[in-house]
Image (tube, grey):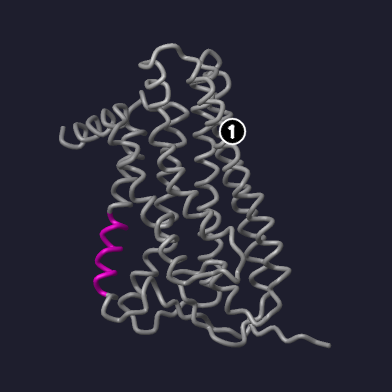
Amino acid sequence: MEMKNYSSSISGFILLGPSSNPHLQKPLFAVFLVMYLITLVGNGLIILAIHSDSRLHTPMYFFLSNLSFMDICFTTVIVPKMLVNLLSETKFISYVGCLVQMYFFMALGNTDSYLLASMAVDRLVAICNPFHYDVVMSPRRCLLLLLGSCTISHLHSMLRVLLMSRLSFCASHVIKHFFCDTQPVLKLSCSDTSSSQIVIMTETLAVIATPFLCILFSYLRIIITVLKIPSVAGKWKAFSTCGSHLTVVVFFYGSVIYVYFRPLSMYSVVKDRAATVIYTIVTPMLNPFIYSLRNKDIKRGLRKLRDQVYS
């Protein structure tokens, strides 16, 4: 029996946004616009500070500058469209536009997680094997880690979008979210999504769990090494270099695990939207502050950048 695929005839979807309350649209627009601008300015300053100060041309800051760049791109994939929809009555996104947004959201988000894993490896080598740090974390290997992160993430996104493009949508076209994410789009499909869910869950587990386990292993090794340091001051000095990175990891992976590693039947619109806001908007906005407030090198780089601008 021939099965009709309605996805090809769909003109698009309706994105409800962060809230369906019409009285909250303009206040939310103002809040998210401010957060987006802070994200752009903060991460942009981190990138400029690192590239303008030769003393920051090290593996750790190489990964941090790329993380800031990915955060800018990551939020830009989602927030501008959401801001337009908050002021619009139609809140429309085309079918192709939805798949494109889904693709880049996943590609950039996964690249973020692999960069966080690369930064954990950098801290592992710096603390546990400092005498071989320059050899292990050579510029060539850092570049390979970056290219590998991007390649794996984009292949993952391509597979996910291909699976989503094969689904049929023949009922409601209203996505109860502020962007085209996998779970809310799956909820709209009238196809049998059980096989797609299994593939997506398995493949997501592999792609997200790999960098997460790498981070856990790195910090386990770091803790074991730090505990062997005899002085309390030495232990604090060694572990303090990981504080900013660990804070970002907790924010990012805490919300990601909550949203994606549950069955579709447990999907909750309100709770998932709140958790998604944390890793898509809040974390990229906070990253520059987390990495600069207690980092003397970044503060020095920002001062040098300021002096160059006003000189």
Examine the structure image and report whether residue 137 is included in the region drawn in magenta: no
Where residue 90 sits: x, y (%)? 39, 84
Where residue 298 sits: x, y (%)? 31, 31
**Left-right relation of 186 to 229:** right
Instruction: Count every numbered label the image shows and give the total.
Output: 1
Instruction: Give residue 99's quadrant in the image.
Output: bottom right
Instruction: Give residue 121's quadrant in the image.
Output: top right
Q: Is residue 261 above or below residue 133?
A: below
* Frontmost residue, 202 versus 179: 202
Q: Is residue 203 above or below residue 69?
A: below
Helix, strand or loop at mark 1? helix
Where residue 279 sits: x, y (%)? 43, 54
* Frontmost residue, 273 versus 129: 273
Where residue 52 sits: x, y (%)? 32, 32
Measuring 46% from the left and 80% from the top, which residue is drawn there?
Answer: 14
Instruction: Give residue 44's quadrant in the image.
Output: top left
Q: Which residues are magenta?
A: 26-37
Q: Main secondary structure of the magenta part?
A: helix
**Left-right relation of 299 to 282:** left
Residue under label 1: 217
Examine the structure image and report whether residue 35 is included in the region drawn in magenta: yes
Q: Is residue 272 above or below residue 88?
A: above
Tell me the quarter of the image containing the C terminus. top left
Name the amino acid, label 1. Phe
Measuring 55% from the left and 43% from the top, which residue is drawn there?
Answer: 114
Q: Residues within 10 Å of mark 1 (few under 14, many from 20)?
A: some
